[in-house]
Image (cartoon, rainbow, N blue to C red):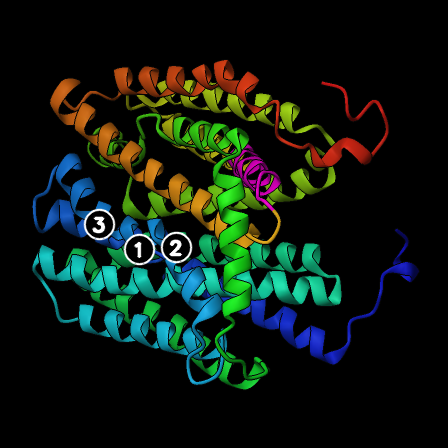
Amino acid sequence: MSLDKVPKLSPQVKGLMFLFGFIYFSQGIAQFSGLMSQPLTFYFKEVLGFGADAATNYLAVLTIPWVIKPLYGLISDFVPLLGYRRKSWLIVMNTMAAMAFLWLTGLTAANQIVLAMTLTAIGTAASDVIIDALMVEKGQQFKITERIQATQWLWFNIAAIGTSLLGGFLIDSFGAESALRIAAVITMVAPAAVVVAVWFLLKEDKVKLDRAQFGSTVQGLWQSVRHPTLWAVMFFIIFWEFSPSLGTPFYYHMTDNLGFTQKFIGTLGAVGSVGSVIGAWVYGFYFARKTLRFQLVFSIITGFLGTIAYLSLMQPSDLAGPIALGLSLVFGATGMVATLTVLTLAAQVCPPKAEGFTFSVLMSVKNGAAQLSAILGAWLFVNVFANTLTPLVWVSALATLSCLVLLPLLRGVKDSTASQGDGEDKKD
């Protein structure tokens, strides 16, 4: 499409685009994978003396609010708060998250810290579901869904770049305890700013409880539950995510064995986020034109190769830093392609009248399987492989590669590329 054919956005739509981008930017800061991730993991390691498995088990609790995402969707869809389905809930959830971050600044015990972080996770997870529902509504209304999604992912990854750099800087500059407190104060600003933005920018008509729509949704869900393709996709997502994760074990390996500074580890996260931005762009301009099967095969193969590539970082060397930077960039990009492929797979199997709820269920399954993967990886690292990363890399890589065996189960999934692009693009 030429530039002169791109439709101009009205002031109302521009305001919505800003709101969506701003909320996703704030999500990139406030989610556990954001600014709090590195300072909190380092605090558990250095101050509380937790091993990789203990730290992972404690932090696994933070996944629970993300596993129950469909509950937030149902409440937001069918239980208006003060007459609003979205606005009031966004304000309440982000206010709770901001207050929990403020509370965390005065805590030292692991149980209390995890409780405070769980409250922040509830707030950010609910906010994520609500803003996605709002994105679907406004995207369909103004026919700008793709532009909204592009804006959201762009600003989320920009936030990820900044938080990765800042997290490592805070640790190196202020130490474990002070870095955690400062990170909590900075992060608190993100949900607080969302409250202000939603209050002034989100215009929403008042509604009442819609029992008829709820009944229609339940009927659509019942039809989807009886469809074997949905179960096949769910099984694939579980298996795809449930390969023993290198996450926390690799962080401990970088700190204890490779001797990377916390600032450099933060830089690796930022470089990975840059790769994610590139991956999202490449996906939109190239992979979106390919068949879903092509996308899945590419994601599985590159996931396998990417995991194997980390064997080059098993021993300290002068090249460890540059190699880690290169791997973070390249596989940050391919990892984003894989993420968007799985999201596309999930979206294609959602039934009419229950798209939002079914999608949130599949994403909850994805989040739960990913956390179980992290727990399993940390347990194997400490209890089976004696804090040696090499065998864990092989187990994780082979588990990813074995997903190729499951592809025949997905033949019933409708391919959105069936009517797009030229014939050559649709061959794999």
| Mark 2 surroundings within 10 Å by alpha-carbon count, few (fewer than 14), some (14 through 19), many (20 or more) | many
Q: Position of residue 397 (x, y in %)?
A: 39, 18
Q: Nearer the viewer, residue 95 or 410?
A: 410
Q: Residues within 10 Å of mark 3 (few under 14, many from 20)?
A: some
Q: Position of residue 16 (x, y in %)?
A: 63, 73
Is 221 on the left-hand or right-hand side of 262?
right
For badge 3, the amino acid type reads: Val
Per the picture, the main secondary structure of the magenta-coloured stretch is helix
Q: Quadrant of the C terminus?
A: top right
| Closest to the observer, 100 or 325 | 100
Q: Label 2 belongs to which residue?
A: 69
Residue identified by numbered label 1: 65
**Element on which disc 2 rests:** helix
Asked if residue 21 shows in the view, the reply is no
Q: Are marks 2 and 3 in contact (CB under 8 Å)?
A: no
Helix, strand, or loop for circle 1? Answer: helix
Mark 1–mark 2 distance (CA, rounded to whole Å): 7 Å
Kindly report the distance in space between the C-alpha atoms of the residues bearing marks 2 and 3. Answer: 14 Å
Extent of the magenta region: 334-351
In this orientation, which residue lies closer to the viewer: 45 or 22? 22
Compared with 287, 207 (above or below) is: below
According to the picture, the residue beneath numbered tag 3 turns out to be: 61
Q: Give yes or no for contact between labels 1 and 2 (Cβ–Cβ under 8 Å).
A: yes
Q: Where does residue 364 sit, x and y in percent of width and height?
A: 39, 46
Could you tell me the amino acid type at mark 2?
A: Lys
Give yes or no for residue 65 being in the magenta stretch. no
Q: CA distance from mark 1 to mark 3?
A: 8 Å
